Amino acid sequence: MKKFLILSLLAVVVFSACKKKQEIPAYLNPELPIDTRVDDLVRRMTLEQKVAQLNYESPAIDSLHIQKYNWWNECLHGVARAGKATVFPQTIGLAATWDKELIHEMAIAISDEARAKYHDFQKKNKRNIYQGLTYWTPNINIFRDPRWGRGMETYGEDPYLTGSMGVSLITGLQGDDPKYLKLVATAKHFAVHSGPESSRHSFNAEVSDYDLRETYLPAFKMAVKEADVYSVMCAYNRFKGKPCCGSSPLLNDILRSEWLFTGYVVSDCWALVDFYGGHKVVPTKAQAAAMAFRNGTDLNCGSTSPALVKAVDSGYISEAEIDVPLKRLMKARFMLGMFDSQDKVPFSKIPYDVVDSKEHHELALKTALKSMVLLKNEKNLLPLSKDIKKLAIIGPNANDVEVLLANYNGIPTDPITPLRGIREKLPNTSVLYALGCQHADKLPTLTAIPASAFYTNAEKNEKGLMAEYFDNSILKGLAKHTRVDSTVDFYWWDNAPYEDMYDDSFSVRWTGVIAPPVTGNYAIGTLGKLKYSLYINDSLILKFKNEHSSSKEYEFVKMEAGKTYNVRLEYADKDGGEAEMRLLWELPGSNYEKEAMDIAKKSDVIIMCMGLSPRLEGEEMKVRVDGFDGGDRVSIGLPTIQSNLIKKIYALGKPVVLVLINGSAVAINWESQNIPAILEAWYPGQAGGTAIADVLFGDYNPAGRLPVTFYKSVNDLPDFSDYSMKNRTYRYFTGEALYAFGYGLSYTTFNYSDFKAEKSVIGASDSVKVSFTLSNTGKFDGEEVIQLYVRNPISNQPQAIKSLKYYDRLLLKAGEKKSINMALAAESLATWSDAKGGFFVESGKYEILIGSSSVEKDLTNVAIEVK
């Protein structure tokens, strides 16, 4: 009997264990195929649950083990908007490296920081915006016109350069694990999207099939076919009458059917609102939601997708049609390891100390160095001697951290401006500094209000502002900490001001009086994120709320010397990845030009750090000043105030070096003719100041190349809204450029010789081997960017003047020679034919051109024939 009871008990235990094992839902079984798991999960959801998961702010479904998730994350040139991070050069600067391997290495570093941050957020139960693994990067639109404010986010004007850079970034971000994605990368904005910013919500891009296939689509095709990008973002504008996020020809026919894309499509943010707001192609939100999701959009960044429930009820879309995008999204979350034990996900083991690490700092410097383009070096003025006795550093970009970081950026812990970089380079030189001028006329240069201007009690001469720190986001109750802050100039990254306060929910109130030193019209400004209000004498001066990024805001306030003004600043942070608050001003009557002239007269050499600013060029901005309109540019020269200062400094007769810091091409015609040395530094990231100093003083030989054409005038270009490629970019521009695509100088010289093709005649499916000898004929070790272009000079089809098909960046020591061999497939000679409805290799003669830029005089050619 006892044996029977024991056996019965064992049977019950085994049966219970088996039953329990059988009760594990298929979607939670990591041994099953992902598609099986996805199907099982989706069939368990109600319509309302399904619809909720199609929004970028996806709520938790506890009964199904689905955690809350926000799909919006950014890492354009480093993890952005999520606290401290390593910040690399802005994308246009990355393109100027012409170094695919470096971009891949950088992407691995970025994805390491992203994964480390994500798992740290998970441990702290943080699942808000900018705390996930689905990144809306890269921007691979074509920078077709220098007036586009967002062009700095791209890899330039060439489809092949853009596509190859995008492939390198995407593969580095997504990783190479056979089962799990490291991150999801997102190729954006699909398609035919490059300004103007002011009309992007209503604009209809009409382009020929030739321009579509030859210019606007190749980088996206490469991202899908060569990098297996797992996400694509559809654009705001219409394409041939249909909103891109509701265009079946784009999203279903080309992207999925033709290119076999298997990932998901996310809308640009609030693009679906444009369906009934800007484009007015449908009258209601429900119809807009149905149009988008029936035609290929899978995820809505915005507020329209909840209307899908009503759309189903109204018969605009079926629940079965909703299942299609939902399964794509759930599959992405499975591939990121979100439903598996983290010990099975290899990327969960990346330590947090990779974030902002020494190794990544060094990589940021290496990348910045490689991005520098030497445009002019008359009589070898550069590199400068380190024995200069007195040096003047002048310009609005000389000591401005903002121009290092550009946009869609993280915040580094130790950014190095050009002024700091040069001072650290020359400890024995007297380095004088002056702002010189504003970035543009009537755009205030805002700096932190110093402690000397603040009083907690003016009568008692108590300096600073009384600060009350609250452990909630609404200034409620008693302050947890109080103190006197000498000034308001704080960046807390993803921390709180005190360790005993929660970093995602705190607020601060600063109060006191401000005593203006002079009478006049003060620009009173702020820089902060997430939410703040500024009062002067109890009148609201500024109010700001933005969970995405901070921006310098300001108003003009009349103040009199000898009087005091009550000031109150209230700040709140809630569920944010980073927190900052600064109280700024610009004094009236500042004579920046006189200060610059004074130090220039005293100096042996003058370095002018000029250019543009992310305050001037960018995405849908409020700025309307000289030459700039809402983030786009009206003219393409330097702001007038800067050009005038350069001319006055030059007239002193001293050696002048011009360092340009900007995100788009500038028409520096006078400067190019008169200034002896010009360095293009782009927006160079956290190590930009060190990189600039290394190049100027000879510790690094520059080898960057222009990824865009520098035109002489906006009058050389078609209308900004014209999307035809006629007379745009080096491929179709028939005028004379100021500086050509692919151009860049070195401190050494290179020679190309013995260029030849193995065959003179090939078939349409063959390839041809080409070879040449590259020699470093100068006195410096240096890198050369070899560029191979092709053209068909007698074609009956529409043709580019020439098109880049291959490039590489090679290091040669002084006096060294290298034999270069490469194979060029006849397929790379193919062009689009409207008549044939596809790409084909036309029979006839072609020219293969090799050299150091796209300029004819820099190229050597060899002819081949395709039969």
Image (cartoon, helix red, strand yellow):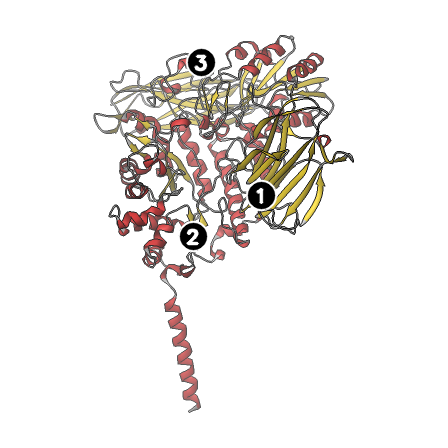
Q: How dense is the environment of label 2, judged by Cα within 10 Å: few (below 14), some, or many (20 and up)?
A: some
Please name whichever residue, 66 or 823, is drawn nearer the observer in this view of the structure: 66
Instruction: Give the total number of marks visible in the rendering.
Output: 3
Q: Position of residue 649 (x, y in %)?
A: 63, 12
Residue beneath disc 1:
572
Which of the marked residues, 3 or 1, is nearer the chain's N terminus? 1
Please name whichever residue, 165 or 438, is drawn nearer the observer in this view of the structure: 438
Residue beneath disc 2:
59
Which of the marked residues, 1 or 2, is nearer the chain's N terminus? 2
Can residue 357 be seen? no
- Whether residue 665 is situated above or below residue 262 in the rendered picture: above
Determine which quarter of the picture holds residue 600: top right
Q: Tell me the amino acid under the disc marked 3.
A: Ser
Tell me the distance, in whole angstroms, between the alpha carbons under discs 2 and 3.
51 Å
Q: Which residue sits furthest left?
A: 835
Q: Position of residue 385 (x, y in %)?
A: 67, 18
Disc assigned to residue 713: 3
